[in-house]
Amino acid sequence: MLDNYIKEQPIACQIIKNAILKNRCSHAYLIEAKEYERKYDFVLSIARYFLCPNHHTQKPDKFCPICSKTAENILDLKWIRSDGMWIKKSQMEELQDDFGKKPLESNKKIYIIENADRLNESSANAILKFLEEPEENIIALLIVDNLYQVLPTIVSRCQIISLKNVRKYESNDTVANLSHFIIGISIDKDKVDAIVNFAIFLEKNGQATILYENNLWLDIFPKKEDMLIAFDILLYFYKDIIEIKCDRFIEIFRDYSEIITNIAYDNDLIQLCDKIGLIMEAKESVMMNLNMNLVLDHLICKMKEVKICRK
């Protein structure tokens, strides 16, 4: 039940309880799990709490049709996982068909999307329609380890719940750290070095980076799938820069601490947040099949403009 997690996730638990107590449930919650080891069980407890007619938090009611069932047997709950690398449009269409009907056991229906950063272009568009025109008594719970991995158009339509980082995994090896975060993708040091070198060159040379983008980026990440992974790595890199800027510890790129510290020194916090936003927009553009050369050109120019306008 929900109270089983209150010591580890007190803020998140209180947000969910207040939503029921004040009758202010959002139609969509984006849960930034930060590698919380019990994230799926926790999100399932949130779903049970919303669906349970008496909103039990301490122990299940054996007479409750929600509390007494396993997740697979709760009729008003649907859990969506990626089919291979991506969550596909057909899964979203099936969801919409299922949720076009009235609840059967509760006064709400809930769908959980695991690894919401794996929505491809078509499935992302499908879920956006669902988020933009929410049906009454339907709640979405989207799970992602890192908020910066999710498309901005989706983030803007959800209430964000960031879980407390109680992750036990820790390594000083950057590739191992990235592999732990970006699951199911092969990452090697050459690719990580390429991203770091691109960031260094861009921070130093600005718009002139366009002249060298083939050697720095496009030759190394020639395909759409490669480029999406590259943007993920770049997002984590700038996230660690923000960590240093906020006087916290580097979480992933520990092999590059001096580089990260130098870039953090040369940017203010607003600049860094703006740059992360631009990288997310570039990733979204690639997902929408825009020309990759033009996307990279645009990113380089916009990153330079951020640096100029904030000085």
Image (cartoon, helix red, strand yellow):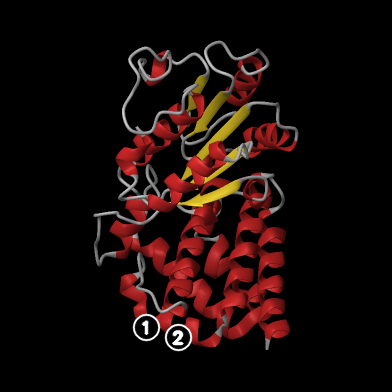
Quarter of the N terminus within the rendering: top left
The circle on residue 258 is 1
Which sits in the foreground, 125 or 160? 160
Which sits in the foreground, 260 or 188? 260
- Identify which amino acid the numbered label 2 is placed on: Asn
Quarter of the C terminus within the rendering: bottom right
Residue visible at 47% across and 23% down? 52
Q: Position of residue 64 (x, y in %)?
A: 41, 15
Callout 2 secondary element: helix
- Identify which amino acid the numbered label 1 is placed on: Glu
Q: Is residue 2 visible?
A: yes
Residue 191, quarter of picture: bottom left
Q: Position of residue 180 (x, y in %)?
A: 32, 51
Relative to 260, is 22 above or below? above
Which sits in the foreground, 308 or 84? 308
Q: Position of residue 40 (x, y in %)?
A: 37, 36
Callout 1 secondary element: helix
161 lies left or right of 128? left
Residue visible at 68% across and 77% down? 306
Q: Is residue 117 visible?
A: no
- C-alpha gap between disc 2 and disc 1: 6 Å
Residue visible at 25% across and 60% down? 170
Which sits in the foreground, 130 or 306? 130
Residue 132, quarter of picture: top right
* Residue under pointer 2: 262
Mark 2 Cα within 10 Å, few/some/many (few <14, many 20+)?
Answer: few
